[in-house]
Image (cartoon, rainbow, N blue to C red):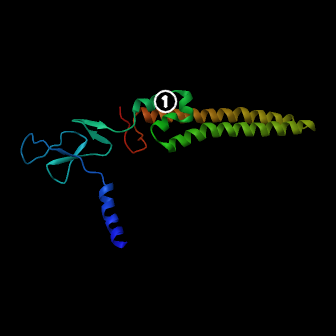
Amino acid sequence: MNKYLLIFLTVLPVVLCEPVEKIPCTYPESRAICVCPGDCLTQYNNNSYCKLKECYKWDNKCISTGESYYTTLIFNVLPPTAIIGIGDLIMKRLDLFAISLSTSLGGCIFMLCSSCCCGYYTAKKNDRHEGELVEKVSRCYVKYGGITWLLIMVFWWGYRIYFIATNQWLDGNGCKLSK
């Protein structure tokens, strides 16, 4: 039993390990200086091979493996899809999606519940003819609470568009968005 476990533990890392794709160097000036043919390549262990950097693949040129920049930007610019974070899902950024969804749906649910509570409390006070001030406060709260929620949503929307348009955010795999 121990023998099989030892073989399993020895072979498993070799099977799971990704092989290093070796791309031959070019020697434009002298045989001693290896120059990698693309910007996404680095020299591998001072050998005559280059290896790919993370987030790239090689097809005689460097190709980014990041999520689509334009699709993400389009879905973050369109208000119906941006509000609930569809562009963040396309980027595979669940953290940003959670913020977008909680800002939009959470704020909506909070405003609905608090408006209902204000209405109930106002109606209860009006039964005793004490509700004039409560009614004014409730109207003010609902009006300015909604405006505050709207401003937060617009700020978050603009913030995301800025960082995606300037390509400063990474996708879910830690790669830059590919154009």
Nearest the camera: 10 or 178?
10
* Residue at x 31% of width, y 64% of height: 10
* Residue at x 86% of width, y 34% of height: 132
Nearest the camera: 51 or 100?
51
Which residue sits furthest bottom? 2
Left or right: where 119 falls relative to 66: right
Residue type (three-letter) at the residue carrying disc 1: Phe
- Residue wearing tag 1: 75
| x, y percent for residue 22 | 20, 47
Nearest the camera: 51 or 108?
51
| x, y percent for residue 36 | 18, 42
* Residue at x 24% of width, y 36% of height: 59
Where residue 117 sits, quadrant-wise, is top right
* Residue at x 46% of width, y 33% of height: 162
Left or right: where 125 falls relative to 76: right
**Residues packed near mark 1 inside 10 Å, few (<14), some (14 to 19) or many (20 plus):** many
| x, y percent for residue 38 | 21, 39
Which residue sits furthest left? 30
Q: Is residue 17 above or below residue 88?
A: below
Where residue 1 sits, quadrant-wise, is bottom left
| x, y percent for residue 141 | 74, 36
Q: Mark 1: which secondary structure?
A: helix
